[in-house]
Amino acid sequence: MTLDEALQGVQSIFLDTAPVVYYVENHPLFADGVEGVIKKLDSGELQGIISPVTLAECLVYPLKIQEKKLQQEFVDFLLRRQSIKMIEIDTEIGLLSARLRVKYNLKLLDALQVATAIRSGCEALLTNDDQFRRVSELKVLMVEDFVEGDVS
């Protein structure tokens, strides 16, 4: 399935942490798999959604290695891009994440990501985490599925 086919009917997509890291850090295998989605965000075809979890997870490594330029690149990408909107985690998302944790045996942060995606009306979630494949409430798109060649 091509990216265009996978995004058929999708207006809003949740960006999990890994695809953001791949794109900002220009990952040799996966950056190209994310680029098509970013182009659709920038052209206005898609609305990107993130949560504070995405921001926090993206900043851990640059903070750990004290790389200010990379920290700023993540902040600029996630918070200053018109096509990406951060949804705050509220009570409704907290309650839904608890139900999703039980239903799919997800880790807390993963459940918060999925709950944020669902509550914000996303039709799809872009990730590279196999744990999300179990989720049936929205379309789960794996970055590895949109990379040329074999990544296994």
Image: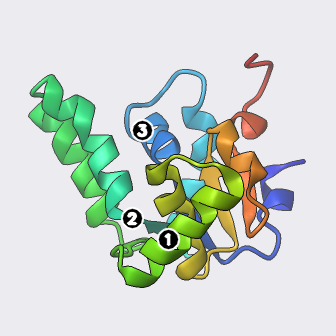
Kind of element beneath mark 2? loop
| Residue 56: percent from left, percent from top | 27, 49
Classify 10 Å Cα crowding around label 2: few (below 14), some (14-19), many (20 and above).
Answer: many
Question: Which residue is label 1 attached to?
Answer: 116
Tell me, yes or no, if residue 68 can be seen here.
yes
Question: Which residue is label 3 attached to?
Answer: 21
Q: Is residue 134 left or right of residue 63?
A: right
Kind of element beneath mark 3? helix
User: Which residue is found at the position 62% from the left and 75% from the top?
Assistant: 122
Mark toward the viewer: 3 or 1:
1
| Residue 51, disc | 2
| Residue 113: percent from left, percent from top | 50, 60
| Residue 118: percent from left, percent from top | 60, 75
Q: Amino acid at mark 1?
A: Thr
Q: Amino acid at mark 3?
A: Val
Q: Earlier in the sequence, mark 3 or mark 1?
A: 3
Kind of element beneath mark 1? helix
Q: CA distance from mark 3 to mark 1?
A: 19 Å
| Nearest to the observer: residue 148 or residue 64 | 64
Say whether marks 2 and 3 touch (CB < 8 Å): no
Tell me, yes or no, if residue 47 can be seen here.
no
